[in-house]
Image (cartoon, rainbow, N blue to C red):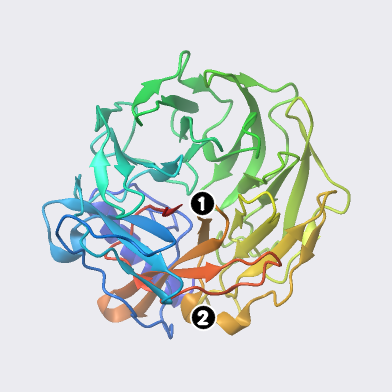
Amino acid sequence: MKKQVRAFLVFVAGLATLGLANCGTYNCATDDGMSFSGSTCTSTSPSGISSGGGTSSSGAAFVFAVDTGASAGSSNGTIDGYELNPSASTFATISGYTAPTIPPSDGGLGMVVAQKQYLYVAFGEAKEIYGWTIDSTTGALTAVSGSPYSASFLSSSGQVAQAQMITNPSGTLLFISLPLTNQIYAYQIGSSGALTAVAGAPFSVPFGPVNMATDGAGKFLYAVDGDFTTHTGSEIAAYSIGSGGGLTAVSGSPFAFPMWQVQGEPTGKFLIGTSGNSSVSGFSGVDDEHLYVFSISSTGAITPVSGSPFATVYSPFSIAVSPNSGGDLVYSFSISESSGQTSFNAEEGYSISSSGALTAVSGSPFTNLGNGSSGSWGQFDQSGAFLFVYGEFITNPSTDTFVIQISPFNVPSGGTLTSAGSTADLATVGFWAATDSQ
């Protein structure tokens, strides 16, 4: 095992003592995060949060991130807020933002935005789900009625996946997968943001579900049987989603496709996936330099499209698919084996044709963006105009000094990424989510 990975495992052990999930080789708070030494990454923006009542926003998007409070030795955690202002090329803490208090020393089990106005975070240590309304102008967070919600089924033990907590495309349903108990919990999201358990939940799964996704139309839910040790998967369970949020197994499910992560695209016709199999993520010694595309039938069954899998330059560690119906774009994020695992590879971008075929967009891989803005996990805002990329870099292994950052990019119609603003440094590891401001 390489020195950089050993240093990262020491870092993970430190997180476990703070009460975060017991991870394997991944960042407990994000799963898809990786830390590296020897990086040229530099800090470009503050990580503190200002107090006050909030001011008018001129930004185009907000990002919210769990701050465990560990870096400042605080007895409380917070939800930190960041604002992207592409016209000024800035991405920094929201001016006048008051950070709400959350359970300390807990990076969470997932964070999602629903309907561009509600933010939810699940905490395993506290066994609670927190919810807030998002002020579309200032980014201020206000607790929704009933928050925090008791969720005794949540666990602080076990491992945490990037997409263990998701919503359907319309943001009316919230799903949480439980790998330890082979279950998926579901909630309806009311008009005020309040959560109500779906009738019949939890729903049984024939394996420990890890990453989840819905198709672009919100008709079906897919859950992968993932292996945290190797960062790979073995099969995909498929469910039709009822009008009230209930899940019914699709005929033929589970499907024997070895994916680590899958995501739907806007038309609802295809499911995009990565096996996650690489010599740096799972230490399996096999780099799978491909993306997989599956056709979704009217019943929810999936089959590979013609030409799948499609070759990539690097072995995808994770993926992000544009939610914009006019975008039809998928981006992959990976870790550099050639550099001795001391950096991330450049992001790759692919367009999705009407038949499901993938074609590299102009400029991919985007080496002109620089290593300091690369990472292992990306998220779009709801409009699909911006892509945010998360990365961790160990700058001094001997002192466990590291930088946790998110970099924003413009996503034009052609898919060629350009910088949308400065990189923002996060205070601690933890889940995060992006949303449009209005």
Q: Relative to 251, is 113 above or below?
A: below
Q: Residue at x 33, y 27 (%)?
A: 194
| 330 or 169, nearer to the observer | 169
| 115 or 207, nearer to the observer | 115
Question: Which residue bears the numbered disc 1?
Answer: 229
Look at the image and tell me whether residue 159 can be seen: no
Which percent across, then down, holds residue 284? 61, 60
Which percent across, then down, holds residue 250? 70, 23
Question: Gap between marks 2 and 1, in whole Å?
Answer: 27 Å
Instruction: State which tag comes first along the sequence, 2 or 1.
Output: 1
**Left/right of residue 299 with respect to residue 264 in the rendered view:** right
Mark linked to residue 65:
none
Dot 2 falls on a residue whose secondary structure is: helix
Q: Quadrant of residue 289?
A: bottom right
| Residue type highlighted by circle 2 | Asn
**Left/right of residue 224 with respect to residue 271 in the rendered view:** left
Which percent across, then down, holds residue 312? 73, 66
| 5 or 202, nearer to the observer | 202
Which percent across, then down, holds residue 126? 23, 37
Dot 1 falls on a residue whose secondary structure is: loop
Q: Relative to 340, is 245 above or below?
A: above
Furthest residue in direction right, as rendered: 306
Q: Residues within 10 Å of mark 2 (few under 14, many from 20)?
A: some
Q: Relative to 5, is 126 above or below?
A: above
Q: Residue at x 54, y 80 (%)?
A: 340
Q: Residues within 10 Å of mark 1 (few under 14, many from 20)?
A: some
**Left/right of residue 320 with respect to residue 85 in the rendered view:** right
Question: Which residue bears the numbered disc 2?
Answer: 371
Look at the image and tell me whether residue 83 can be seen: yes
| Residue type highlighted by circle 1 | Thr
**Left/right of residue 248 with respect to residue 179 in the rendered view:** right
Q: Residue at x 45, y 20 (%)?
A: 202
